[in-house]
Amino acid sequence: TAPRTFRSSVRVIRTLTLRSTRAVGRIGELGLLDHYHLMPDEPLVRWETIRREQLGVAINLIFGLASAALGFCGAILTADHAEFGGCATCSYLFATGAFFVTILLSIAATITRLLDFRLTARKLRLQGRGEKGAVIDRLEKVTSCLGRCTWRLFYCQLGGFLVGVIVLLFALWHIFHQ
């Protein structure tokens, strides 16, 4: 009976979703969206939410990969058949540094993102209370700056990780090819 109950629940949810979507469409056609405070751009809000979630996932993924690569670089030091010297040592140290910088950029991106969320919530609370003026404008400017900073840190993080991978591959070829 559990699968049948699940199927009937899914059917009920689909029906209610379809009916509510039709109702919102009718309300929008009648020009009553402002009266009921419904958002006509719900798909935009949904995709903005998905974009924010994916940014967090990407930052965390690169952080994890950079941490693993830094651990791998540390493990190479203990390999018996690894021969360092010259270009191999320089590229190995550069790749290790790139992974370390990537980890720092990941932490910085996460912090700016959290500050952005915190200040945006504060701004929305103040707007909900009906406040206007310099405080709201200042919070708007700061959150906008933090959002741009988060994206720039993410791109730098991604670039640093890719540079680290390329240089590490070059270093590994020199270390183990000789």
Image (tube, rainbow, N blue to C red):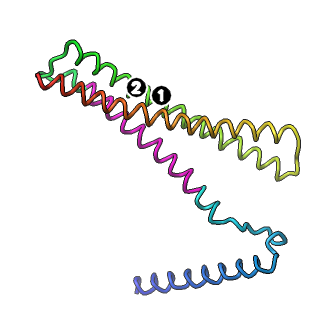
Q: Which image quarter is the C terminus in?
A: top left
| Residue drawn at (58%, 85%) of the image | 15
Image-quadrant location for residue 148? top right
Image-quadrant location for residue 139? top right
Is 126 placed above or below 142 here?
A: below
Q: Are marks 2 and 1 in contact (CB under 8 Å)?
A: yes
* SS at badge 1: helix
Q: Circle 1: is it few (<14), some (14-19), or many (20+) Cα within 10 Å?
A: some
Residue 27 image offset from top left, x and y in percent: 76, 79
104 vs 96, left or right, is right
- Label for residue 104? 1
107 vs 130, left or right, is left
| Residue drawn at (67%, 82%) of the image | 22
Give the CA separation, mark 2 to mark 1: 6 Å
Residue 35 image offset from top left, x and y in percent: 84, 71
Q: Main secondary structure of the magenta part?
A: helix
| Residue drawn at (65%, 40%) of the image | 116
Read off the residue under disc 2.
100
Q: Circle 2: is it few (<14), some (14-19), or many (20+) Cα within 10 Å?
A: many
The span picked out in magenta is: 49-74
| Residue drawn at (44%, 26%) of the image | 101
Is 102 part of what is drawn in magenta?
no
Is 53 part of what is drawn in magenta?
yes
21 vs 151, left or right, is right
Is 9 placed above or below 176 here?
A: below
- Three-letter code for the amino acid on which mark 2 is drawn: Phe
Residue 172 image offset from top left, x and y in percent: 21, 27
47 vs 8, left or right, is right
- Three-letter code for the amino acid on which mark 1 is drawn: Leu
Residue 134 image offset from top left, x and y in percent: 86, 37
Q: Which image quarter is the N terminus in?
A: bottom left
* SS at badge 2: helix
